[in-house]
Amino acid sequence: MENILKLTKEDFISDQMVKWCPGCGDHAILTSLEKIMPQLGKKKEDILIISGIGCSSRSPYYINTYGFHGIHGRALPIASGAKIANPNLSVWVTTGDGDCLAIGGNHFIHTIRRNMDIKIVLFNNEIYGLTKGQYSPTTPLGKVTKTSPMGTIEEPFNPGELVIGAGGTFFARSMDMNLKTQEEILLAASQHRGTAVTEILQNCVIFNNGAHAYINDREHRADRLIHLQHGKPMIFGKEMNKGIRLSPNSYQLEVVNIGENDITVDDLLVHDIHQEDRGVHMMLARMKAPDFPVAVGVIRSVIRPIYSDLLIEQIVRAKNSSTITNADELMQSGNTWNVE
C-alpha cells in the first residue's frame, strides 16, 4: 500500500511517442487520465486499459499500465472477460463515437444492461477521424462529410440517451479542454461500481474542427453550458441569472430567468444524481443548443448489482448445491454409453 501512495502522474506517462495531431482534444483527455490514475488506489499492474480501433483507441500505448489494443468495436467484450476473470482489476475502455456506437453499438448497450464494472471513456468528435472524415453515428443531421457530400440524412445518436435508455447506472459528460470538470467526473466514474460511461466532447482539428465550438465558445459558453452538481440548483449563465425547472404546465424542462415572473432559485430543479427514476436524467442528457444549455458533469449515478458479483454468487450457489466435486465425477454423471 505504501508504494501505491507514492504513485504520481509521471508514473503513468508512457515512453511511447504520442502520434495524435497537434491540437487534438485527445491530448487533454490523456492528461486527465494520467492525473487521475494515481488516485485510484491501485497498483499499476491492477489497472487495465482496453481499446478497439480509432484515434482514441491508441490510448493504451500512451498510459503506462497494462493495456490491450483490440479490434474494431470489440473492446467491451474483451474488457468484460478481463473483469470477470479478475474482479480486482480497474478496467477502463477508451473508445470513440465510431468504434463504440457503430460497429460496437450492440456490445455497448449490453455491457450497460449487464452493469459490468467497467469505466468507458467515450471520445465524441462526431466523425471518423482515423479513417479521414466519414460521418459517424453522432454526426449531426445535414452535416457534409466525405461520405455525405450532400449532408447526412440520419438522426444522430445521443450517447446519454443510449446509456440511460439501456438502464445505465452512471453517465457523465465533459468538454475536452475543461480539465477540472473532466478530472472530477473521471474520478467519480472510477469510484462507481458498475458501468460508468463518461462522454467527452472532443475536437478533431483535421476532419471536424469546431464540432463543439458553438457550446464551447469562450464568450458564450457560460450561457450555453450548465455544470450540474449533485445537491445544487440548476443555475447557469454569464450572470448566473438563468435556471432549469420543470414546467408546471407540461412537466418538461424549461429555461427560466431568475427574478422574472416571480421566479426564484427555489423554483429551480435541484440536481439529484442518485434519483432512480430515469425521467429527469434522460431529459437532462437530451438538452441541446440553442434552446437549452448542454449539461456537463455527472448526470446519473445510481446503485444496482454488478454482473461479476451476481455471477460469482451464482457459481458459489451451484458448487454448494452440487454433488459433483471433480472432473471425473462430472464425466461419469448422467447417462453414459459405450461406442462399439
Image (cartoon, helix red, strand yellow):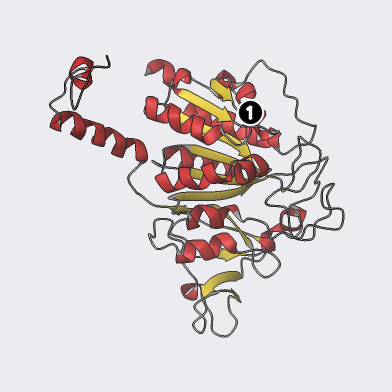
Q: Name the quadrant containing residue 160.
A: bottom right
Q: Is residue 280 above or below residue 113?
A: below
Q: Residue furthest front?
A: 340
Q: How many marks?
A: 1
* Residue 169 point in image, percent of width and height: 43, 50
* Residue 208 point in image, percent of width and height: 80, 46
Side of 328 where 236 appears, left or right:
right
Q: Is residue 32 above or below residue 62?
A: below
Dot 1 falls on a residue whose secondary structure is helix
Residue 6 seen in the current view: no
Which amino acid, mark 1?
Ser
Residue 314 seen in the current view: yes
The residue that label 1 is drawn on is 59
Which residue is rendered at x = 57% and y = 21% of the image?
12
Side of 62 where 317 appears, left or right:
left
Which residue is rendered at x = 43% and y = 20% of the image?
4
* Residue 122 point in image, percent of width and height: 60, 42
Along the line of sight, the residue nearer the viewer: 240 or 246 = 246
Which residue is rendered at x = 68% and y = 62% of the image?
224
